[in-house]
Image: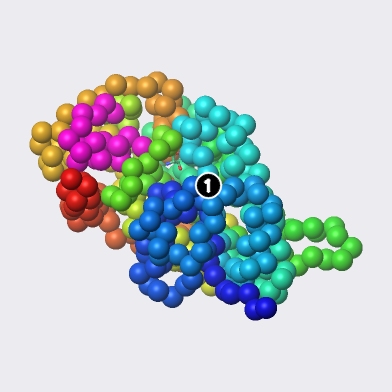
Amino acid sequence: MMRKPVVLITGAGGEIGHGLITRLAASGRQRLVTLDLTRLEPEIGRLVTREFTGSILDQALLERILAEFEIDLVFHLAALLSTRSEFTPVMAHQVNVEGTLTLLEFAQKEGESHGRPVIFVYPSSIAAYGLPDAETRAAAGRVHEDQFTQPTTMYGCNKLYCELLGTYYARHYKQLSAAPAASRVDFRAIRFPGLISAATAPSGGTSDYAPEMIHAAARGEPYDCFVRPDTRIPFMAMPDAVEALLKLAAAPRWQLTRTAYNIGAFNPSAEDIRAKVLQAFPDAAIGFEVDHKRQGIVDSWPEDVDDGAARADWHFDPSFDFARAFDEYLMPAIRARYASAG
Ligand code: SER
């Protein structure tokens, strides 16, 4: 029986998955197979060829997918985000690290079975960085990929280590084996900034104050931001994040000089975001109620990132700066979303 070539998306029901599936389905070029713990929302589920419900740690389920589909591209999005991971660090390690190891091994087997490398696209994060104090952070400015990689969170440690695991599978797999096992994993990672989507509200992240502020205002609910007004980290609108994943996946291997790439678009302070939301929703009640532990996490992340390598190697070029992200993407889409939700 011929297996069918498809793209596999894990964690498909999450924020990035939602945007990626919508975008890929609109292009109509690829068949999509998804894996998530829970059923996809019906309007997303109907865009995919086959929806598997289960854990990325379930070997029997992965064997079934392997037997049925020829996968040449994996977007491995399943993860517990940074705040959530601090509450359940062991579970975070299981999902974020063991889950990624399982998927890398799965990709290697897929590649071996069809004789070509499987492109494995992995969302890493600015959480992979850990800046020690405010002075260093202010002096560092735009942080390069090889600087300050001493994360302080379980999630950040997981992301950084999985970048290394991916590199192992891509370059050094079974290097001492008597029967050399050719690597069949072409691993590529993006260190995402905080992401803001109009279609979904996030859960469990530490950069969530930005999207939470916007979604609460659109719903007419009061919101207390959990970081100080002067807090500044990089953010990006979801359509640019999705385009970046697709561009990196499509780049010829020889153009890539790194395994993990920074990307950035704008880096407003929490007060800048509040002011912008108030322009659109003048009656919004947005205050500040600092959670010192979550503030500490955000303060360990860079104020901005140097994304020169992504721009040079695979022509990363975001469409949305801060003003356009709000005026042309977030505000119209969020208004429409909550208006139609009644
Ligand atoms: N935005 C994510 C979080 O806050 C980090 O990648 O957990």
Q: Quadrant of the C terminus?
A: top left
Q: Is residue 256 left or right of residue 326?
A: right
Residue with the most extreme right position: 178
Q: Position of residue 269 (x, y in %)?
A: 28, 36
Residue with the most extreme left position: 282
Per the image, is 223 magenta?
yes
Q: How many marks?
A: 1
- Who is closer to the viewer here, 279 or 11? 11
Instruction: Identify the residue at image location x=75%, y=67%.
Output: 182
Per the image, is 240 magenta?
no
Question: What secondary structure is the stretch in magenta mostly built from?
Answer: helix
Q: Is residue 186 left or right of residue 203?
A: right
Q: Is residue 278 visible?
A: yes
Residue with the most extreme bottom position: 2
Query: What residue range appears in magenta?
Result: 208-225
Q: Position of residue 312 (x, y in %)?
A: 44, 64
